[in-house]
Image (cartoon, grey):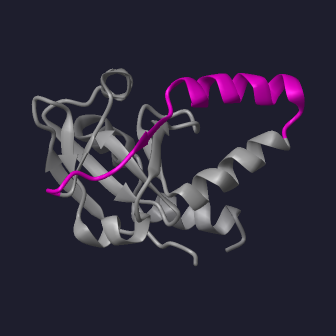
Amino acid sequence: MKIMLFGGYQHNIDKKGRVFIPSKLREELGTGFMICRGIYGKRCLCVYSAEEWDKLVAKIGTLPSAKSSAVKRFLYDGAFNIDFDTQGRILIPPVLREYAQLEGEAHIIGMDTNLEIWNTELWNAENAEYTPESIASIVEELNF
């Protein structure tokens, strides 16, 4: 079954590094999922269901070996199998909180098949460049 993760949410990160994930997103992710550094050049974290993680790992396995080794090192060094606590929170490992500069508040975004977790200030800066006109231009470039 294909998961569909959508929406943007603001939630506080507590002193232990836990952040609440909304129930709709929890339902879609299921249990036993992965959290890792984002691999698309942004300082955010990505959360994948077990099924989507397996697809990502398989896709990386098709890359030429020298390039796939670099991606694997970056990805797997900061990848953790996690689950929700009884209050619907996840514990973000310290190394990932440091990488994504997460403290205080996080912006959680459903990105169809995965979640992104951003430092709210970094998210606002990243998102500021996108206007309805720039998105229309991107859509046109993609022949969508």
Residue extending farthest to the right is: 64
Q: Is residue 55 above or below residue 60?
A: below
Residue at 33 percent of width and 29 percent of height = 93
Q: Is 27 within the magenta?
A: no
Q: Nearer the viewer, residue 20 or 143?
A: 20
Q: Is residue 142 left or right of residue 6?
A: right
Q: Nearer the viewer, residue 110 or 141?
A: 110
Q: Is 72 within the magenta?
A: yes
Q: Nearer the viewer, residue 138 or 58?
A: 58
Counting from the top left corner in percent of width and height, residue 56 is at 66, 49
Q: Is residue 87 left or right of residue 68?
A: left
Residue at 29 percent of width and 73 percent of height = 24
In the image, the segment drawn in magenta is 63-87
Locate the N terminus and report the quarter of the image it occupies: bottom right
Residue extending farthest to the bottom is: 1
Residue at 13 percent of width and 34 percent of height = 104
Residue at 29 percent of width and 61 percent of height = 8
Q: Nearer the viewer, residue 134 or 1?
A: 1
Locate residue 21: give its quadrant: bottom left
